[in-house]
């Protein structure tokens, strides 16, 4: 079998970008069991309620739902177990300092395979206020309307 290359997206947390200001992102490896990897290869996972935490000098991913593997037997994994994140010591130390600041948290943004290995993109984030969310939606809508008007003008020029 040929070695897998490139990036294959499994799950994405779009709501995190809506609910948080993303300050910094980190690519982390994951410690997984065999049935978890097989379930991920089928493209089944959910990051919706997930968050990361640093405990005792180690980074952990909580509440990420990887469903049980359908052909698994008694060796199957628990769907919402906590999973260890693989980061360099300097990155963990930096995250410890940043997450102790008020309002900062670690949220998973994407779960994917990179060159055959499961990776998770974790973001250092600060929660948005309700008016920030409305402002972001307004800017997105204005950008969409401007693009629509520009494409309509281009169509009229061609005709």
Image (spheres, rainbow, N blue to C red):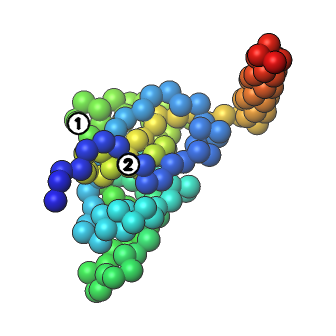
SS at badge 1: loop
155 or 48, which lies in front? 155
Q: Residues within 10 Å of mark 2 (few under 14, many from 20)?
A: some
Whichever of labels 1 and 2 marks the residue nearer the N terminus, that label is 2
How far apart are the two marked residues, 1 and 2, measured between alpha carbons?
Answer: 23 Å
Residue at (45, 46) in percent of width and height: 110
Q: Is residue 13 something that shows in the picture?
A: yes
SS at badge 2: strand
Q: Is residue 121 above or below residue 65?
A: above
Residue at (24, 30) in percent of width and height: 90
Dot 1 corresponds to which residue?
Answer: 88
Q: Nearer the viewer, mark 1 or mark 2?
A: 2
Q: Is residue 140 above or below residue 9?
A: above
Q: Is residue 8 left or right of residue 2?
A: right
For residue 66, what is the image quadrant? Answer: bottom left
Q: Position of residue 34 (x, y in %)?
A: 24, 69
For residue 126, what is the image quadrant? Answer: top right
Residue at (29, 72) in percent of width and height: 35
Q: Position of residue 108 (x, y in %)?
A: 46, 46
Quarter of the picture holding the C terminus: top right
26 or 105, which lies in front? 26
Q: Is residue 102 above or below residue 5?
A: above
Q: Residues within 10 Å of mark 1 (few under 14, many from 20)?
A: few
Q: Position of residue 3 (x, y in %)?
A: 18, 51
Q: Is residue 58 something that shows in the picture?
A: no
> On residue 8, which mark appears?
2
């Amino acid at each position: 079998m040929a070695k897998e290359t490139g990036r294959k997206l499994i799950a994405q947390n779009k709501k995190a970008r809506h609910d948080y200001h993303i300050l910094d992102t980190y690519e982390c490896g994951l410690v997984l069991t065999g049935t978890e990897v097989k379930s991920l290869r089928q493209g089944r996972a959910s990051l919706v309620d997930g968050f990361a935490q640093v405990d005792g000098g180690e980074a952990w991913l909580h509440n990420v739902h990887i469903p049980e593997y359908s052909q698994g037997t008694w060796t199957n994994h628990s769907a919402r177990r906590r999973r260890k994140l693989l980061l360099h010591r300097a990155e963990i130390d930096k995250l410890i300092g940043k997450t102790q600041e008020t309002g900062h948290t670690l949220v998973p943004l994407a779960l994917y395979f990179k060159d055959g290995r499961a990776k998770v993109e974790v973001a250092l984030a600060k929660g948005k206020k309700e008016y920030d969310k409305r402002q972001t939606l307004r800017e997105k809508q204005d950008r969409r309307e401007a693009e629509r008007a520009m494409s309509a003008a281009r169509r009229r020029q061609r005709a």
